[in-house]
Amino acid sequence: MRRRSRPTLLAVGVFALLGVVGCDADDHPNEPRPAAPVELTAKIDNEKVTVSPGKEGAGLFNVTISNQSSEDAALTFTGPTDRSTPSIGAGNVLTFKLDLEEGNYVVSVEDETVKPDKLEIDEPRESAQNDLLLP
């Protein structure tokens, strides 16, 4: 059996030590994962806009919008974060991702005869850091 010489072992030890020292926690912070997206639904008809749930924590939302009116419509969220969807054809459905900040929102369409709805966004939701089976 062949024995390694002391200089080889010393070199391996030095490289291993440099590898450990090179891994600095500031280079790879373990930032918490954002909150899991929440499902939000909206319905547009000829009389009003309806959003459910009407109160939720700030963060990312998957919004499913059903346009049950007789006209094409775009849904507008007016508040601390102003966002609008693309036009949704009459009788069609749109899925839209939306990141909303804390505050009160009015959810409306351009047609002023259609009554808007209100949406209350509370403090940001907790991190999904320790939730299993999330994408």
Image (spheres, grey):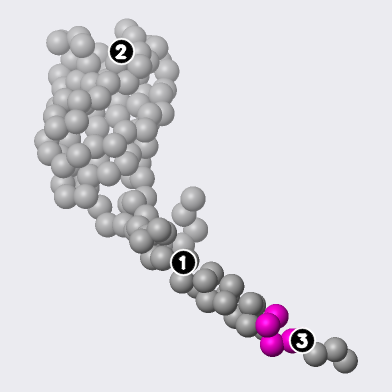
**Circles 2 and 1: CB distance less than 8 Å?**
no
**Magenta stretch contains residue 69:** no
- The numbered mark, 2 or 1, whose residue comes first in the sequence reads 1
Q: For residue 23, which numbered disc appears in the image?
A: 1
Q: Helix, strand, or loop for circle 3?
A: loop
- Which portion, as a residue range, is magenta? 4-8
How far from the left and from the top, in percent, is residue 105? 15, 31
Q: Amino acid at mark 3?
A: Arg
Mark 3–mark 1 Cα distance, whole angstroms, equals 28 Å
Which residue is more in the foreground, 131 or 34?
Answer: 34
Q: Amino acid at mark 2?
A: Ala
**Circles 3 and 1: CB distance less than 8 Å?**
no
Q: Residue at x 33, y 52 (%)?
A: 35
Which residue is more in the foreground, 68 or 99?
Answer: 99
Mark 2–mark 1 Cα distance, whole angstroms, equals 53 Å
How far from the left and from the top, in percent, is residue 43? 30, 26
**Residue 61 lies in what quarter of the image?**
top left
**Magenta stretch contains residue 5:** yes
- The numbered mark, 2 or 3, whose residue comes first in the sequence reads 3
Q: Residue at x 16, y 42 (%)?
A: 102
Does 108 sit above or below residue 122? above
Q: Which residue is mark 3?
A: 4
How far from the left and from the top, in percent, is residue 132? 46, 62
How far from the left and from the top, in percent, is residue 50? 23, 28
Majority secondary structure of the magenta segment? Answer: helix
Does 7 sit above or below residue 24? below
Mark 2–mark 3 Cα distance, whole angstroms, equals 77 Å
Q: Amino acid at mark 1?
A: Cys
**Residue 95 lies in what quarter of the image?**
top left
**Residue 2 lies in what quarter of the image?**
bottom right
- The numbered mark, 3 or 1, whose residue comes first in the sequence reads 3
Q: For residue 73, which numbered disc appears in the image?
A: 2
